[in-house]
Image (cartoon, helix red, strand yellow):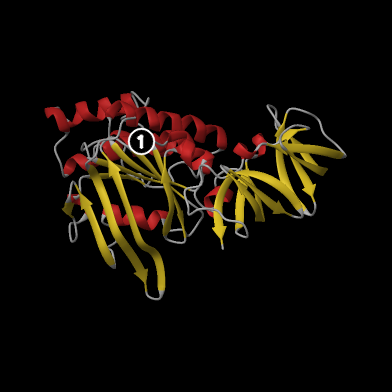
Amino acid sequence: MALVSDPVLELDCVTRRYGGTTAVEELSLSVTDGEFFTLVGPSGCGKTTTLRLIAGFEDPTSGTVRFGGTDVAGVPPEDRDVGVVFQNYALFPHMTVGENVAYGLNFADPPGGVSDEERVAELLELVDLPDTQARDPSSLSGGQRQRVAVARALAPGPDVLLLDEPMSALDAKLRERLRVQVREIQQELGITTVYVTHDQEEALAVSDRVAVLNEGTVEQVAPPRDIYHRPESRFVAEFIGDNNVFDGEVEAVNGQTATVTASGEPLLVGIGDWSGSSVSVGDRLTFCVRPEDLTVASGSNRLTTSVMSAEFLGETTRVRLDWRGHELMLRTREALDGTVTVGFDPEDARVVERRD
């Protein structure tokens, strides 16, 4: 999608501390109008805290949260024009589906001048749950209850939709179907969305941009393809998908290629897209090669490995290899065993760290 220049939502050097524990540290982000923006990272990295700071459930220890350029310090959640979908649905068990969806309309008129009843019917149609107004939430499946929660959050017509790990309680197949539905709803409405997940595949599948968080700080913000193919740190390289990470010393530099000795083997590594400082002889480099970029018996760099294990996954087989005591991962359609020569070309390697 084409992103506009003016952000709808900004976090400027936001820090949140709980006593001696820092949950979020000097975190800066901006989200543009209509964007699907995802926060991803391991447990405890600050994703949910960041979402709560945006919603107004938490106050920053320092830094500023802005909506449309306006500082919202002291503005309560109900006045921030956000809709929130929680991990556990948080539906009211004593209310019908229709009453749950209409709950937010007790505090704000529905957009477009329609009645509450029309708005409820419209949203239940949108989430593919028509004719369920009179049903009890307990009679619905987990995926259906989550869609009711989305409809409830959308009822007052918020400017920003916040979703906190909404798929985590669902099975894998249902998560895949529901994330497609959530993305379709977001695109149809054009609503600015901030989505929290620990699932890397989910983050890559639904987002316009992804922010990878680690220990309360931002490691990288970029579109999904850049996050996957051009990680900017070792953490991102290892957290997002499978990756083969190598450490070595630069022995020579020739234009856009460096010769790096890793585990005693000289390897040619592309350095043309390295966004850090220049690479010199004697530097220590960390670079990575995706499992699908390793090939059997081809490539400029050849590695003699032994098969440790193989998992048949249908479309591909994921093979764990031992190379000089270093574990590698290969994705292939071939059945492999014993000793295998694998290779990669310099342009398949991505430098993620340089040390003098």
Does the image show residue 258? yes
Above/below status of 246 relative to 334: below
Indicate the secondary structure of the residue bearing disc 1: helix
Residue drawn at (41%, 38%) of the image? 146
Residue 331 at what x, y percent from top left?
70, 35
Viewer-proximal residue among 126 and 327: 327
Amino acid type of the residue that numbered disc 1 sits on in the rendered structure: Val
Residue drawn at (37%, 25%) of the image? 128
Above/below status of 63 relative to 79: below
Viewer-proximal residue among 267 and 337: 267
Residue drawn at (38%, 36%) of the image? 208
Residue 134 at what x, y percent from top left?
32, 30
Does the image show residue 234? no
Viewer-proximal residue among 92 and 355: 355
Residue drawn at (28%, 54%) of the image? 11
| Number of numbered discs | 1
304 relative to 210 in the view: left or right: right
Residue 84 at what x, y percent from top left?
31, 45
The residue at the far bottom in this view is 20
The quadrant where residue 336 appears: top right
Residue 229 at what x, y percent from top left?
53, 39
Quadrant in the picture for the N terminus? top left
Tell me the crowding category of disc 1: few under 14, some 14 to 19, or many 20 or more residues within 10 angstroms, Cα based.
many
79 relative to 173 in the view: left or right: left
The quadrant where residue 116 appears: top left
Q: According to the image, label 1 marks what residue? A: 148
